[in-house]
Amino acid sequence: MLRRLFSLAVALLLAGTLGACGGAGSDADSAMPQPSSGDRVPTSGGEPAAPAPEGIEGVEAFVIPSRNHTQAALEYDHLPPAGGDHFPVPGTCGFYSSDAPPLELLVHDIEHGAIWIAYRPDVSDDQLATLRDLVAREAKVTATPFEDMDAPLTVTAWGRQMPLETVDDPRLPQFITTYRNGPEAPEPGAACQGAGVPEVASPSA
């Protein structure tokens, strides 16, 4: 609880200083939205389109219909989301085993060119250790637990997604190299810092 309260405080401070999506004149000064007490707002998490053309087997391309800032708590129709509307503040990239930033912040990260690895909580300790090491050395990568996935891991960039059985799949570093700060991301040079206190920090890029 203290970690989450600290994360919210950091986000409030950063909301006035981080550049917002869409450049000057947008909602750069919006505060971190508080958890909604009402219903979540349905929204698109991306629409599967076709195998991605970049040449990595198993990567699916998604059409992302919108990427608006919102204060509303969202319910994405595709999980894990491959893009879409999101909170005005991004999450802080790194490895999380608990207290991960909400999906609405992680979507903001991938808009900034970050890579998000969602992992099922039942993956082995060895897999988690490998994942921590990967996040510690790879810039702009976040790893968070995620329930109810068919595959043990799902790696996501803006408009691109791939399920994986193991962390040591050679396609994972290919995915990171290909899509981190890639042209698919609307704002590939923006920071991956905001709300959240990761157990292992991902380097800046």
Image: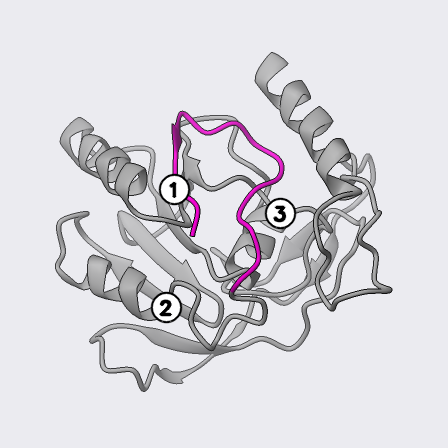
What kind of residue is marked 1?
A: Pro
Q: Which span of residues is magenta-colored?
A: 189-205
Does 112 appear above or below 91? Answer: below
Marks 3/2: CA distance? Answer: 18 Å
What kind of residue is marked 2?
A: Tyr
Q: Which image quarter is the N terminus in?
A: top right
**Comes first in the chain, label 2 or label 1:** 2
What kind of residue is marked 3?
A: Pro
- Please say whether residue 197 is one of the residues in the magenta stretch: yes
Q: Residue at x 41, y 78 (%)?
A: 61
In the rendered structure, the answer to whether residue 143 lies left or right of residue 74 reads left
Q: Measured from the top left, where is residue 112 in percent x and y?
A: 55, 60
Q: Which residue is mark 3?
A: 90
* Secondary structure mostly taken by the magenta-highlighted segment of the chain: loop
Contact (CB < 8 A) between labels 1 and 3? no
Q: Tag 3's secondary structure?
A: loop
**Comes first in the chain, label 1 or label 3:** 3
The circle on residue 179 is 2
Looking at the picture, tell me which residue is in the foreground, 193 or 109: 193
The quadrant in which residue 122 appears is: top left
Q: Tag 1's secondary structure?
A: loop
In front of the other: label 1 or label 3? 1
